[in-house]
Amino acid sequence: MDVKKIVLLVGALLIAAVTAVMAKNMFTGAGSPQAEAAVVAGPEVLVATRSLPVGTIMDATAFRYQPWPEGLVQPAYFMKGTAGGSPQDLLGTVVRTEITAGQPITNGALVKPGDRGFLAAALSPGMRAVTVSVNKTASVAGFIFPGDRVDMVLTQEVVGEGGGVSLKVSETILRNMRVLATNQRTESKDAEGKTVVTDIELVTLETTPKMAEKIAVAQTIGKLSLSLRALADNTAELERAIASGEIDIPEGADPKEERKMILSLASKPSDSGTTFTVGADVSRYQRGSVPVKPREQILALGPPAQAGGYAPARPSGPVVRIARGNSVTEVPIGAR
């Protein structure tokens, strides 16, 4: 090959390489336009932070403020800075129609305590609403709010046959009941303009029909008090229910199915696995059992008669036993 042609070929290749490098640098060096997120200008409305099914009791974690296009704002939305748009106004309300995550909350989707249909919307299918009377101490000093879970404790005194000091006992008769409503009011304000929270006197609970009967009887037996449950108790309740056979999780169940079972257990009240404490467990000077008749009184009364009550006292001193067939009679010596 001619040397001149080789030189021209090498030069052309070098020029092509330099051109390619320059073109690459030119295209990569030019800054591409950055896509900027459009800022939605408009009022802030309350939207659901998660899916809220029918019957959900609203708490502070269920909603938040979010900017919304002004042209899409509806009069039924809860807007920040307007009358009725405060999050405090929504606490304790119940979802009447399902609200999806991110959807604005409307006034018609909620029902407030005291409104018609409130309890009907809050109750789960097959459940009942029961109202119990409590005092400041029995209601955890007023720190029980709608949506909380509580246990019910019955305290009573048991008087036995022997008289004297009665047995003092308390027992947890119902567990994991959902609080539907209280008669707590926060509308009133003091001279400084601060909100005054009144003590709770009535608490409405969600129970099964059988548990409603038990509460009605328990109110006539002794004093009722409520103990607030922690949210972390659901895991322990699930383990207990699995161990006792109340819930059977099949092998290879997917996480969604297990979560569904956990949620089902968390919303289910129970009257099993109750515990109790007697006076002797608290103080050595209290009784640990029900008083009974002293042994001397029982011996003096003799064995119980067949028709009820006690037979005449057994005679003291020497006796003569007279057997007539299967009947044995004891006759004191000297008696006629």
Image: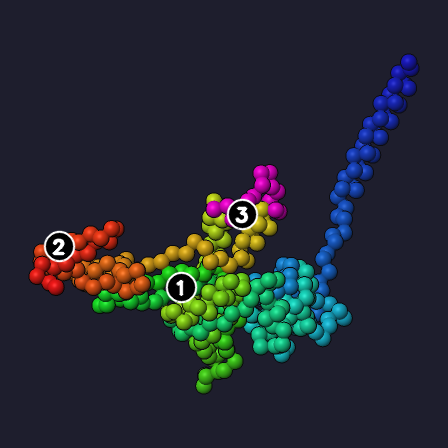
Q: Nearer the viewer, residue 300 or 11?
A: 300
Image quadrant of residue 68? bottom right
Residue 320's tag is 2
Residue 245 within the segment the image draws in magenta: yes
- Magenta extent: 244-257
Q: Is residue 218 above or below residue 256?
A: below
Q: Which residue is mark 1?
A: 153
Residue depicted at 35% across the width and 63% down the height: 170
What's under tag 3, amino acid-wise?
A: Ile
Disc nearer the start of the sequence (1/2):
1
Alpha carbon separation for disc pair 1 and 2: 58 Å
Residue depicted at 38% across the width and 56% down the height: 275
Which of the image's four quarters has the N terminus?
top right
Type of colouring: rainbow
Looking at the rendered structure, the secondary structure element under dot 2 is: strand
Image quadrant of residue 62? bottom right
Q: Callout 3: few (<14), some (14-19), or many (20+) C-alpha neighbours within 10 Å?
A: some
Determine if residue 197 is in view: yes
Chief SS of the magenta region: loop
* For residue 141, side relative to residue 101 (left or right): left
Residue depicted at 58% across the width and 77% down the height: 114
Q: Callout 2: few (<14), some (14-19), or many (20+) C-alpha neighbours within 10 Å?
A: few
* For residue 5, side relative to residue 167 (left or right): right
Alpha carbon separation for disc pair 1 and 3: 25 Å
> Picture coordinates of residue 153 (x, y %)?
40, 64
Q: Nearer the viewer, residue 195 or 255?
A: 255
Residue 247's tag is 3
> Picture coordinates of residue 107 (x, y %)?
67, 73
